[in-house]
Amino acid sequence: MSTAVQVLAVVIGVILVSVWAMELWFYKNRRLYFMFLIKPADYDAVRLWRICIAYYNLTTAAALFIGTYLLHTSHPDAGQALILFTACQHVFLAVVMLVTQPRLWLNSVMEAVPNLVLLVVAATT
């Protein structure tokens, strides 16, 4: 895989770690309401969802980091598979989010675009 794909994988991983932190600790911040659409009255009701999604993002970031690492070991095929699967998964989940909650269109764009770029770069290099 090209250096550009590897850089994109790491950047997307860092973004996912940031989203993990926001979902876990900063979801009550009113400046992030546009991102989560969680009303104060619903904080307890969405606790399980919020924590599960936060750790999903953290483990997905780990897959990207591990995939990038594996590219530089004797297991480059496994690294490539992890990176490509993770990117495809996020594009698919962005579409699901858009269909199920159109008000989160910006989240869908932020989730899909970097991963689509990674996939296009991977396919063309």
Image (tube, grey):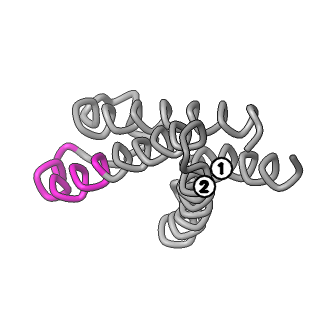
**Which residue does the numbered mark 2 point to in the structure image?**
87
Disc on res. 105: none
Disc on res. 115: 1
Segment tinted magenta in the rendering? 40-55
Local SS, label 2: helix
Residue neighbourhood size for the residue with mark 2, other residues' Cα within 10 Å, grouped as few (<14), some (14–19), many (≥20): many
Position of residue 94 measured from the top left corner of the image (x, y, whole percent): 57, 60
The answer to whether 99 appears left or right of 34 in the picture is: right
Q: Estimate the spatial distance between the alpha carbons at disc 1 and disc 2, rounded to whole Å.
A: 5 Å
Nearer to me, 79 or 48: 79
Nearer to me, 76 or 39: 76
Q: Is residue 69 above or below residue 109?
A: above
What secondary structure do most residues of the magenta stretch adopt? helix
Position of residue 98 measured from the top left corner of the image (x, y, whole percent): 57, 64
| Badge count | 2
The answer to whether 117 appears left or right of 76 in the picture is: right
At 50% across and 44% down in the image, what residue appears?
64
Nearer to me, 106 or 78: 78
Nearer to me, 26 or 65: 65
At 48% across and 65% down in the image, what residue appears?
101
The answer to whether 40 appears left or right of 59 in the picture is: left
Residue at the far front: name it. 74
Q: Are marks 1 and 2 in contact (CB under 8 Å)?
A: yes
